[in-house]
Amino acid sequence: MQYAVLVGLALFFGFAFEAFYGTELPKRPGGIRTFPLLTFAGTALYLIEPHFALAFVAGLLVVGSWLYAYVRASLQIKDQIVEAHFVVPASGVLAYVIGPIALTQPLWVSVALVVGAVLLIGSRNALHAFTQRVPVEEVLTLGQFLLLTGVVLPLLYGAPKIPFTAITPFNVWLAVVAVSTLSYGSYLVSRYALPRGGVFVTALLGGLYSSTATTVVLARRARETGLTREISAAIIGATAMMYLRIVLVCAIFNLPLARAIAPTLVGLGLASLVAAYLLARSEPATDRGTDLPSNPLQLGTALVFAALMVGISVLTTAVAAHLGRGGVLALASVVGVTDIDPFVLSLVQGGANTIGFATAATAIVIASSSNNVLKAVYAVVFSRTRGSWMPAIALLVMSALGLLATGFLAR
């Protein structure tokens, strides 16, 4: 079975390589015959002495010398395709080593390597075009995201709880990573996957990482171009996504609390989404998206978010200890006029255990309702148009419905 898979992979790799480079590099070393022969040679040399693989290493040196000679010769050819200098040798080395990999590793490893190489070779034009579209700042941002997830998060594992809170530094940073992943993912989709998805679709994606900022952007656009039904629907739709985002974030860290708030928030979110969709359909969609806030994933933003989460967690613990349930609910109504994510995360990562699930669920709904009041004010103030009453009233209605629902949560 292993040898049959090996032969199939070698032939597939050679066929794909020759199909992609057969006309552009007629004198390349590699193709439908060469790659299988390299694979067979690597396999045979490995089987001769598999313990130390000295024969295989010697063969690798020979193949490397052959490819080095090819690279030197290709560098001296005028107008030679640059990819020939490196892609061809890399493909030859992979063809040589795939045999021992297929014999010593699980089947999926060798298949994934060959298929991945073929996909990279075949998507050359698409990948080059994509790199031209992505600015350098986006690459640096991706590096920051990897730093947040792959370096800082593991370093904080096992650290003791933060004084006067029920959370640890690892919990805080895990929350930062979770929110950053959701924000960054929706930003990338809105900018690169659906750059011309229209105002409504773009606003939905914007609501996944900041419905407040998206509302401000849409209201400012309404002041410049006029408040259309599509923009009004987009403002409502962004808030609908806020409800769904809160439930998703809660489900990641505290499933029982997510179950407690899901009926209310999912119901409000779906109702808002349907209303926004029907309103958007009443007017032809535009071809243009809207300029959403800039990339939300920055190291400075992450640090501020972490500091806010710790500060709100300390404040929530103190308020719960001295003022009880009423104080926590009053605090929820106040933090709703700012960024509610740190408050929500401070509850799902330990605060709910201190104040009780019913109080925590009620506080989250109150905070989201308070945030809707703020967005209603933003819709009127930043748009400065007569029609701004439509999205503002819709946001206030959602806020009132959320407050009414808290009566059921408190039971």
Image (cartoon, grey):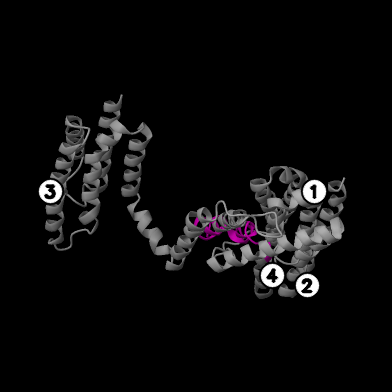
In this rendering, the answer to whether 405 lies above or below 34 is below
Tell me which residue sits at (84%, 61%) in the image: 322
- Determine which residue is flagged by label 4: 219
- Determine which residue is flagged by label 3: 66
> For mark 3, does the 10 Å Cα neighbourhood hold few (<14), some (14 to 19), or many (20 or more) residues?
few
**What type is the residue that disc 1 sits on?**
Gly
Separation of residues labelled 3 and 2 (CA atoms):
75 Å
265 horizontally vs 97: left or right: right
- Residue 24 appears at what percent x and percent y? 21, 52
**What type is the residue that disc 2 sits on?**
Arg
- Determine which residue is flagged by label 2: 386
Tell me which residue sits at (33%, 41%) in the image: 113
- Residue 195 appears at what percent x and percent y? 52, 60
Report the magenta residues as a range.
Answer: 185-212
Separation of residues labelled 1 and 2 (CA atoms):
44 Å
Q: On residue 356, which mark appears?
A: 1
Give whichever of discs 1 and 4 has the lower sequence position.
Answer: 4
Give whichever of discs 4 and 2 has the lower sequence position.
Answer: 4
